[in-house]
């Protein structure tokens, strides 16, 4: 193997070794936030986990889907929706990993569906 190719391979292996392992939190959250949970209970549980989140009205949820369909993983279900983020980790080279979440509620303020996803960023 040429020295340059060997060096490049070593760098890629080093950087990939520094990446954190996938978090178990998305699966834990999916198990915890089941349909039927009230908006009040969901908000209390998100706050207890240190989540930064915002509650949107049904009209705001619908407008977000129409304006930016890539933002929303779940369609509104007639009630409010919640978007949030939980920081998971930071790397020594400036990257970070977060859990992003979306909860959608019925008109009666009970949870209809939830989406949790781990995302990473280099900067």
Image: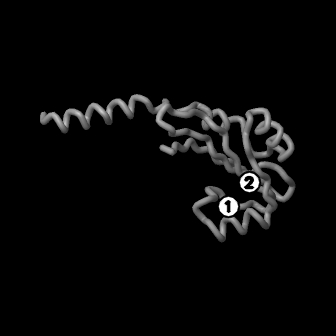
Other residues around mark 1 within 10 Å, as few (<14) / some (14–19) / many (≥20)? some
Taking the spot 67% from the left edge, 61% from the top edge, the residue there is: 75
Pointer 2 and pointer 1: residues touching (CB < 8 Å)? Answer: yes
Query: Of 95 and 53, which appears nearest the observer?
Result: 95
| Secondary element type, mark 1 | loop
x, y percent for residue 10: 27, 31
Give whichever of 69, 88 is nearer the camera: 88
Camera-side residue: 32 or 118?
Answer: 118
Q: For mark 1, what is the residue?
A: 75
| Relative to 65, residue 109 above or below | above
Decide which of tag 2 and tag 1 comes sooner along the chain: 1
Is 109 placed left or right of 7 in the picture?
right
Q: Is residue 70 visible?
A: yes
Residue 113 visible? The answer is no
Query: Residue 43's quadrant in the figure?
Result: top right
Question: What residue sits 71% from the left and 35% below the top?
Answer: 32
Which residue shows up at 72% across the image and 61% down it? 76
The x, y position of residue 106, in whole percent, is 80, 56
* Residues packed near mark 2 inside 10 Å, few (<14), some (14 to 19) or many (20 plus): many
Left or right, 121 with respect to 65, comes to left
The disc label shown at residue 104, or none: 2
């Amino acid at each position: 193997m040429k020295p340059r190719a060997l060096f490049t391979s070593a760098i890629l292996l080093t950087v990939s070794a520094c990446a954190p392992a996938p978090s178990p939190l998305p699966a834990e959250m999916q198990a915890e936030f089941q349909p039927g949970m009230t908006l009040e209970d969901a908000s209390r549980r998100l706050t207890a986990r240190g989540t930064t989140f915002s509650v949107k009205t049904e009209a705001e949820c619908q407008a977000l889907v129409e304006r930016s369909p890539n933002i929303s993983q779940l369609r509104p279900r007639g009630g409010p929706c919640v978007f949030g983020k939980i920081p998971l980790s930071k790397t020594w080279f400036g990257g970070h990993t977060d859990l992003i979440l979306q909860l959608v509620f019925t008109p009666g303020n009970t949870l209809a569906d939830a989406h949790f996803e781990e995302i990473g960023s280099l900067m």
